[in-house]
Image (cartoon, rainbow, N blue to C red):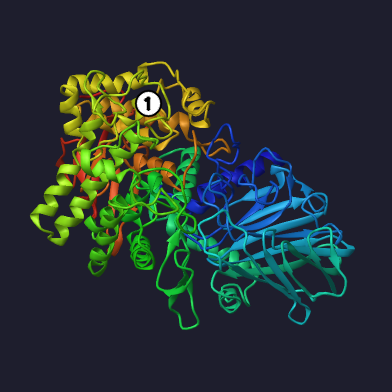
Amino acid sequence: MKRIALIILAAVLVAGCCNEKTGLVTEPADYVSTLVGSLSEHSFSTGNTYPAIALPWGMNFWTPVTGLMGDGWAYRYDAHMIRGFEQTHQPSPWINDYGQFAIMPVRDAQAVDQEARASWFTHNSEVAKPYYYQVYLADHDINAEIAPTDRAASLLFTFPESETSGIVVDAYNEGSYIKVLPEENAVIGYTTKNCGGVPENFRNWFVVKFDKPIESYTVYAGPEKALTGAAEFEGDHALAVVKFKTVRGEKVNAQAASSFISLEQAWTNFKEVEGKSFAQVKDAAKARWNEILGRIQVGGGSEDQYRTFYSCLYRSTLFPRKFYEIDEAGNPVHYSPYNGQVCDGYLYTDTGFWDTFRALFPLLNLVYPDVNTEIQLGLANIARENEFLPEWSSPGHRGCMVGNNSASVVADAIMKGITPESEWQTLYDCIVYGTEHVHPTVSSSGRLGHEYYNTIGYVPCNVGIHESVARTLEYAYNDWCILQIAKKLGRPQEELDKWEARSNNWKNVFDPSHNLMRGRNLDGTFEDNFSPYRWGGAFTEGNAWHYTWSVFHDVDGLKEEMGGAETFTAMLDSVFVVPPIYDDSYYGFRIHEITEMQVANMGNYAHGNQPAQHMIYLYDWAGAPAKGQKWIREVMDRLYSARPDGYCGDEDNGQTSAWYVFSALGFYPVCPASDEYALGTPYFQKAVVHLADGKELVINAAGNSQATPYVAGMKFNGKAHASSFINHSAIVKGGKFDFTMSEQPVE
């Protein structure tokens, strides 16, 4: 009877997350698991995420650490030991972190080293929500809890009875400083730890303040070297442990904040938690997440579907993160990783546009335009602080991936009315500069190979520039994006003609004999020994089967080059029909993206990596939307879940999650910077998107289920809509979709 009562109670609690009248989720934060994607490793990714305890787009995240100091895989679900709780800014394990430091409660104040202080834990005693994290540290008999703000956090530790309780503050190696202020019950310091993208004067200043008097303390110059009588240390690796006696069940609240600007600003940021109880911080964080996640309400689905959807929406609202701070006068200011100065205004960082231009930024423009306005103002600030917009930022320019996709991110925001008109010219000038230059130290920013592309119309595959076809395709799309901005600015016709001509350069790497994209030599001939299964070489983390479809702005042109709709459809079909064989000779080993394609059992379709994610929607251009609907549902049903292995590859700063969010609503932005969405198949019986100015987009699909993946008909605002496309300009006015779903394909 007791077990039955508990089951009933759990059902009541879950049901309380939905409005009884509408069936829409009302407490979305409680459906999120931050552990989705954390069962990953170097050779196989199911997300490559960590449980980020943060506010949406917050400057500082926190996470439990199972890895060694500086390990990009800071938290792994299959690990058993926690070494600390880390303030992190890591956007990806491959990019790694910067400005991180750790806090760890211990029963034995001598347990300072990351190995000595480590404690066993189990997921059975772990709660992982966006606004709250809790875990039991078995070796210390300590319960740890964390609740975040934008730039600070409260860490609540429940201690056992002990004469030697302590809290370790580890500023990490590679340059740090720490000082204990016993009269203020505080520890201050800075860390310089980073993996690039910062000037020489980079610092992350932090303050940690305790609500229990410090009885004694020890400062360390490295974990093995205690400094007798010292209150501070500056050097390679600074640590401190504050000590006190505790009775069983005694709670100690450690409140922490940091700043990239100064120690004084860190104390200003500390006001986010100052004078607030742990419960107050936690409740405010939950309210904020419910507000942000509640911008999209879904209903008429299963509990697992809700968990998957809102876990994806959570990942879509983490990056890019705030890099600006609020000064004493209430104004936004930021430390610039581009010139090393403190500058006025907004700045966001920690994202790779190669990934996120596709769906993440269009999602921001649709659902969170206020946030992307700040991001775009930040990009304009970057344009004033150096010569290039970043293509990967963490926190400044990082060498990763290809393309010039800042043009897409900027153009989409301008075309959708997000960016203030006063910044259009600044952003345009910076983007245009990048089409004719490459960053002197970070070749990802600007355009590597522009000398070739701007003269002969493609990047040759035999001039020592890797991933030449990928670059050509993305530069061509980026030029189309620049064209859209140029039109808005009223630029001269000669200038418009140039961008339009360059936007057709994708044709220069299309081989009609194979109906696939192919590397091209400097002399105009196509590369020898071509294999559509060969990963890398002329392509970026993919092969010709994946990249051939990267003509976002001219799908009709691609269809024509292939010989029409029938051949185009057959080529799309072929991606799913050919076996998941591969050629890894370029890399010399099987990269994890290849493995993730293989195990998906969808032929050569590689949803776990971004170049192929939009491909399913291209069936709309072929006049065969039902084929796309079939694959959309299969991907959503099989390749996504709310489990720790819930992704089918790297999650990548919200992009893979944003694909799911858009697809669940029933449409997708194949070509950002256009006004067009391709229609797919809605996932829930009802969804409501709360737009700007109180408008609502209502999506009804009565009777929708896993057995009815096909769209038999659709009305928009009461009128039959036969097209496979819908305009953004129509959607943002608010309105209602009414989908009729079917078990059988309807063409």
Task: Please indicate whether residue 548 sits to the left or right of residue 125 in the image.
Answer: left
Q: Residue at x 23, y 44 (%)?
A: 454
Q: Residue furthest left?
A: 493
- Label 1 neighbourhood size at 10 Å, few (<14), some (14-19), many (20+)? few
Q: Position of residue 591 (x, y in %)?
A: 52, 30
Q: Residue at x 20, y 30 (%)?
A: 558
Q: Is residue 613 visible?
A: no
Front residue (pair 129, 489): 489
Task: Please indicate whether residue 20 sits to the left or right of residue 422 in the image.
Answer: right
- Label 1 belongs to which residue? 707
Q: Position of residue 291 (x, y in %)?
A: 44, 60
Q: Quadrant of residue 580?
A: top left
Q: Position of residue 552 (x, y in %)?
A: 25, 39
Q: Residue at x 39, y 54 (%)?
A: 439
Amino acid type of the residue that numbered disc 1 sits on in the rendered structure: Ala
Q: Locate the C terminus by quadrant.
A: top left
| Residue 218, placed above or below residue 91 | below
Q: Residue furthest right?
A: 163
Front residue (pair 591, 465): 465
Disc 1 on helix, strand or loop?
loop
Task: Please indicate whether residue 16 sits to the left or right of residue 142 in the image.
Answer: left
Image mark count: 1
Q: Locate the N terminus by quadrant.
A: top right
| Residue 263, placed above or below residue 415 | below
Q: Position of residue 111 (x, y in %)?
A: 84, 57
Front residue (pair 212, 691): 212
Q: Residue at x 22, y 32 (%)?
A: 508
Q: Quadrant of residue 667?
A: top left
Q: Is residue 727 visible?
A: yes
